[in-house]
Image (cartoon, grey):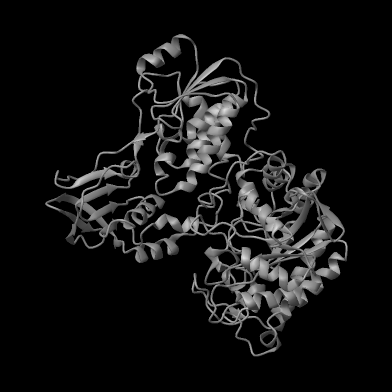
């Protein structure tokens, strides 16, 4: 069967080089509310890698909408749209300007003005009540879409995409959850969208693309848009469109738009299939929803689910996804962790990928292709994510790389975590395959020693130390009758005693939650104890906080909140409330410490020529591990001192 994923697609007389879309998403790359040169480099890199259609970060079409600090404003985006179009044009990629308004799901913190909404319905998240839009506001909104489209045309883009998705004002008019009006905009929920489409089409003309991102299932069937209603909406609007992107989600289910790996891949398949049948060929349809594997994307095209596929996170993970697939190779995988590609949080992080730390840093990060060629041997000690990435890049630069590993298999802590997070091994498996294809020699089950370091140093062989981490000592006394293990040991297969299990989680990340779910499948008494006010507090940044707590509840996991452990013995933990100081006891036969681990520095204490990367510097996440491995391997003239590499790393990440 032909690989139609990489075939051309014609839209409004314009030809996209592939059927893969890079969809709109928040990046925090903005210069104020304008698209910046970093945006241009970010989009141009995906165009060079074969993306067929790129939709820029959604720009607010009216000053009343300022949903996050660096949210683009259409009034300030003309120059950026022009630069993106010019940068992408040599690759044939169609560039659409993303346009929208978040309405009652926005924020008044930045605009310092009232939110707009169809009706006075408070947002589920912020509880803020909007003003009910009157004729003047409706007219201003329509004119905002019109003027933004006119500016996009002037900037030379190929068209626009209008947002009627999970966080959009247009969708809020479509939904019985938020549209309680008794006028014509209540009697006909699509009226406003039709008016907007007409105004935009008048500016675009027939030879530019008019696309609509449409939520066809709000997952709130008691009042929201249902799949049947979504299909009806699509059928009614299709004649006005050149492209229709089918999505799900609404005010009560925004996290379902781009969920993490707990949701199945390509989860919108049946929804998209039904919508495509409803529009009956009137408009090409795009499948969106955790499609990260080109095999799945191709299957969607082969089985008539869609005419094109949005693969946004997959192209953040590998900007060359289309070209790599076209060449018959496997792209760097997206593991759908959401840890660094969802950036709507108070830190304003720049969009990137745990497996591809160059993403989002295209204008400031050195490229592998431009790095000076190396000759001679290099030794990498440790084959976790940091070591594998360092070995991969060094081998790509021409070095003769030997990877030395104490365990029997590469992967480090990621392979250990695969007991309850098997999706993560796709990344380290890809790194290992890339290393082997570049000639890296693996010496497994061969722990490095001080004498090995002495020999390599005498021979002038550069060394990268990526030896990982070790468990930390517990900061409170625990008697021997309670079995104490760290999370890694449990995942590695340590036999646990019978009786109640308590996971101590002072971090609030995914480790304790995932491990508790895994243990609860076979043990009846599992609890998480945390000093935070909610279990898994940091999962809000990946969109999994509410879902994670629901899963823990369904699995029967007990949660002890705002608590610290004082001591343990005789089958109980003595715990103290952070707020009241009141003490109580918690039954415990097995205590699992889910704290941050400590660097394994046994090999570097007397060595100044070896470069340390990853957890042996400071245990953190896969992102930092891979980023440091890459930064070390891209040092201009090979490997230097720790300080040189980390100064370079700091320069890159702070630019």
Q: Does the image show residue 634?
A: no
Farthest residue to the front: give it.
1
Farthest residue to the left: give it.
570
How many labels were placed on the picture?
Answer: 0
Q: Tell me if 462 is positioned left or right of 506 in this view.
A: right
Q: Does the image show residue 275?
A: yes
Q: Tell me if 372 is positioned left or right of 256 in this view.
A: right
Q: Tell me if 440 is positioned left or right of 30 in this view.
A: left
| Along the viewing direction, whichever of 457 and 142 lies nearer the viewer | 457
Farthest residue to the top: give it.
458
Kindly identify the residue that appears in the image at 82 percent across and 64 percent down: 150
Image coords of residue 67 (percent x, y)? 59, 64
Q: Is residue 560 above or below residue 368?
A: below
Image coords of residue 285 (percent x, y)? 73, 64
| Along the viewing direction, whichever of 534 and 298 lies nearer the viewer | 298
The quadrant the C terminus occupies is: top right
Q: Is residue 49 above or below residue 458?
A: below
Image coords of residue 164 (percent x, y)? 67, 69
Image coords of residue 611 (percent x, y)? 47, 24
Quarter of the image holding residue 191?
Answer: bottom right
């Amino acid at each position: 069967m032909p690989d139609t994923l990489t075939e051309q697609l014609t839209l409004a007389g314009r030809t996209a080089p592939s059927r893969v879309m890079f969809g709109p998403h928040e990046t925090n790359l903005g210069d104020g509310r304008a698209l910046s040169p970093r945006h241009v480099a970010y989009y141009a890199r995906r165009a060079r890698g074969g993306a067929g259609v790129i939709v820029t970060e959604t720009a607010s079409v009216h000053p009343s909408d300022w949903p996050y600090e660096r949210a683009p404003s259409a009034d300030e985006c003309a120059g950026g749209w022009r630069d993106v179009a010019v940068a992408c044009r040599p690759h044939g990629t169609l560039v659409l300007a993303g346009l929208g308004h978040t309405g009652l799901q926005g924020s008044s913190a930045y605009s310092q003005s009232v939110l707009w909404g169809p009706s006075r319905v408070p947002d589920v998240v912020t509880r803020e009540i909007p003003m009910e839009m009157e004729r003047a506001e409706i007219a201003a909104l329509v004119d905002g879409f019109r003027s933004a489209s006119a500016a996009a045309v002037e900037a030379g883009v190929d068209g626009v995409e209008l947002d009627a998705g999970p966080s959009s004002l247009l969708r809020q008019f479509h939904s019985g959850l938020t549209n309680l009006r008794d006028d014509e905009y209540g009697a006909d929920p699509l009226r406003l969208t039709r008016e907007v489409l007409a105004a935009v089409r008048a500016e675009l003309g027939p030879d530019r693309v008019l696309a609509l991102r449409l939520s066809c299932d709000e997952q709130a069937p008691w009042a929201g848009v249902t799949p049947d209603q979504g299909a009806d909406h699509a059928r009614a609007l299709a004649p006005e469109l050149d492209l229709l992107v089918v999505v799900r989600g609404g005010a009560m289910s925004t996290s379902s738009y781009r969920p993490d790996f707990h949701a199945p891949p390509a989860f919108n398949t049946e929804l998209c299939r039904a919508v495509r049948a409803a529009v009956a060929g009137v408009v090409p349809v795009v499948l969106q929803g955790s499609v990260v594997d080109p095999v799945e994307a191709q299957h969607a095209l082969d089985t008539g689910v869609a005419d094109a596929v949005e693969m946004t996170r997959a192209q953040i993970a590998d900007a060359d996804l289309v070209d790599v697939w076209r060449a018959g190779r496997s792209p760097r995988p997206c593991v759908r962790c959401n840890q660094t590609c969802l950036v709507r949080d108070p830190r304003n992080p720049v969009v990137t990928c745990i497996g591809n730390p160059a993403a989002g840093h295209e204008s400031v990060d050195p490229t592998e292709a431009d790095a000076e060629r190396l000759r001679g041997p290099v030794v990498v000690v440790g084959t976790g994510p940091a070591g594998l990435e360092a070995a991969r890049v060094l081998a790509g630069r021409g070095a003769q790389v030997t990877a030395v590993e104490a365990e029997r298999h590469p992967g480090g802590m990621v392979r250990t975590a695969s007991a309850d997070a098997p999706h993560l091994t796709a990344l380290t498996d890809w790194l290992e395959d890339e290393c082997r294809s570049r000639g890296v020699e693996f010496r497994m089950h061969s722990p490095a020693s001080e004498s090995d370091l002495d020999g390599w140093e005498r021979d002038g062989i550069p060394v990268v130390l990526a030896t990982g981490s070790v468990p930390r000592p517990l900061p409170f006394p625990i008697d021997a009758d309670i079995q104490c293990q760290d999370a890694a040991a449990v995942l590695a297969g340590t036999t646990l005693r019978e009786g109640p299990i308590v996971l101590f989680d002072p971090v609030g990340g995914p480790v304790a939650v995932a491990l508790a779910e895994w243990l609860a499948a076979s043990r009846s008494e599992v609890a998480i104890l945390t000093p935070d006010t909610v279990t898994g507090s940091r999962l809000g940044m990946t969109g999994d906080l509410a879902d994670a707590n629901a899963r823990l509840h369904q699995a029967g996991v007990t949660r002890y909140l705002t608590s610290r452990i004082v001591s343990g013995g005789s089958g109980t933990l003595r715990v103290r409330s952070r707020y009241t100081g009141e003490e109580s006891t918690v039954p415990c036969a097995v205590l699992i410490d889910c704290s941050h681990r400590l660097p394994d520095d046994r090999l570097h204490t007397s060595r100044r020529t070896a470069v340390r990367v990853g957890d042996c510097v400071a245990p953190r996440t896969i992102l930092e591990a891979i980023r440091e491995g890459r930064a070390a391997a891209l040092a201009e003239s090979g490997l230097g001192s720790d300080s040189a590499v980390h100064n370079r790393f700091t320069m890159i990440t702070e630019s």
